[in-house]
Image: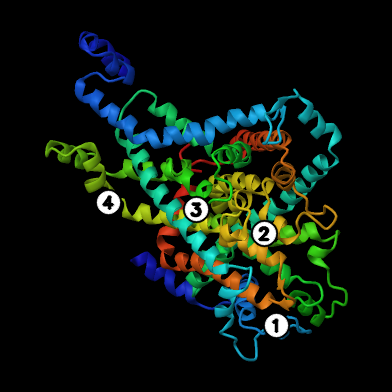
Amino acid sequence: MAVAQNQQSVPITSRLSWISRAVGARSKTQTNKALWGYAFSLPWIIGLIVFWGGPIVASLYFGFTEYGITSAPKWIGLANYNHAFNGDNLFWSSLGRTFSFAAIYVPVAIVGALLLAVMLNQHLIGTNIYRTIFFVPHLIPAVALAVVWTYLLQPTLGPVNAFLRDLGIDNPPAWFTSRDTALYSVTMINIWAAVGGNTMLIFLAGLQGVPQELYDAAAIDGGGVWAKFRHVTLPLLTPTIFFNLVLAVIGALKVFTTAWVATQGGPSYATWFFALHIYNQAFLYFKMGYGSSLAWVLAAILIVFTSFQVVTSRRWVHYEGA
Amino acid sequence: MAQMTAQQPASFRLTPGRGVLYLVVLGLCVMFGFPLFWTLMSSFKTPVEMAAFPPVIIPDVFQWENYNRVLVIPRIPVTVWVMNSTIVVTLTTLGTLITASVVAYSFARFEYRGRDALFMITLATMMLPAEVTLIPQFVLFYKLGWINTLKPLWVPAWFGGGAFAIFLMRQFFLSLPRDLDEAALIDGAGYFRIFWSILLPLCKPILATLGIITLIGSWSDFIGPLIYLNSPSKFTVSVGLQFFNNSPEVGGEPLQHLLMAACMLSMIPTIALFFLGQRYFVQGIVMSGIKG
């Protein structure tokens, strides 16, 4: 359609100024309007160039240089990437730790959020109050969250271990302070903060979009609670599950603040996640070149994971009317 | 109506199954609520109660003056942090609301070459992790001499406010009837006038949503302030809290109880805002999920 219109207006176009042709307009009014359009999007065009485009190009370039911010970047080719893969003994271990974190965090947070949402969808008395209480941890700034949990999980004086001792557990875990439990403790507090948050609200909205007729139909066919969930709720919720899954994976692979505040990556590197590794290289040792190359490794991993999920989603995500 | 009356009595009938469900929900409420309750109680404790064994949950006498004392600790300038955070949050939120709505108006109502490509690029920036742009942005602000100032934290918000903000606003503008614009145009209003006097007043609900989300995000932001600020007098509440946590004993006096009061101060704005604007907030989250 657009092409046909263009051809009809050739005589008019030829009389228009080069400005009109440059902005894709076919009359003076349209030219004027298009110029206003550019003017209104100008802040973002500048923002995209200064805070996105420029930095992306610069970061790609820094990745191939040795750059200590005070002197000019020095081109060293693939040396940074070579060091990461073959020389830096914290590279693979921090990556592995981040994956271990994600392997627990993602399934527990997704299934947990779904269960909470299903529970809140049962028309219990006081549902709004429960929803708010589940959601509040998500509103606590990550730093405060980490500080509070360091005190709650303090091995000798903390209330959690006091409670466990009351239950008859003589040697409760040392949580953040032990090499063996620190990673699980950080995982646990991240799940605690996330499970009742946005993920749950999005599931709840998804559940409320499931038409009642389908449940009625399932009931007529003799379906019980589980059958209704398995054959009505779950298939209709797959787009929501997919959306939450993508976000949870991205969030998990970028885990930083809670570990940084609660354990500073310790004890003896037990919670030294990949994002902490990037931060330390770039902003503690000011190795901007090496830090940039690590950031691109993270970006590549996120892109691979997200694309993998998008591609495999066709097999299990059910879109209404598709 | 018939459906509602048919459903309600069944929902409120207490069967054994629902009894168990109530117990589970109550248990979960304790699990999610206890840490906050404990922090609140600890913020009223004496240093002795804070370090007591076995732990004291509810203090004997509520030390209300903890909240006065937390504001005047030597070398822990909590009041300054609150002021810095207020400046950053206000400027970030204003910048995001104003520029994101202007840019979204352009995307939703104007036709020009490159608009759709620009919008696709905008969406693409949501996929890229911030880590990639963090280092060059740091270099940029370093060259500008903005390190250890609040500028790197709020200035970028004045350039469109980011892809999510623009996307959210654009979808809302698209839902407003174009007849409004055309009527105003015939009456002789300019494009900016149409935006400011006709469309923006209709955007109040979505502006509230975006404002709350931006405010909470900016108040809780940790990585930005951690990277750009290095003297305690410039800290925001988040980095300040971390600094306080790492130096809990100034002059040999234990201050953990005041740290808990500081934690409460850091949580109050986000939690209060959520309660005040719960409807708008939830709507925004849900809208972000619907496109998935």
Look at 61% across and 62% down and name the residue there. B240
Query: CA gap, disc 3 to disc 4?
Result: 27 Å
Query: CA gap, disc 4 to disc 2?
Result: 38 Å
Q: Does dot 1 land on a helix, a strand or a loop? A: helix
Look at 61% across and 44% down and name the residue there. A246
Q: Which residue is mark 1?
A: B47
Question: In the image, A197: left or right of B201?
Answer: right
Query: CA gap, disc 3 to disc 1?
Result: 47 Å
Q: Using the image, determine if residue A176 lies above or below residue B112.
A: below
Q: Does dot 2 land on a helix, a strand or a loop? A: helix
The residue closer to the viewer here, B210 or B230, is B230
Tags 1 and 2 both on a single chain? no
Circle 4/circle 2 CB separation < 8 Å: no
Numbered tag placed on residue A19 in the rendering: none
Amino acid, disc 3: Gly
Mark 1 or mark 4, which is nearer the start of the sequence? 1
Look at 56% across and 84% down and name the residue there. B64
Amino acid, disc 2: Ile
Subunit ID for the residue under disc 3: A
Q: Does dot 3 land on a helix, a strand or a loop? A: helix
Numbered tag placed on residue A206 in the rendering: 3
Subunit ID for the residue under disc 2: A
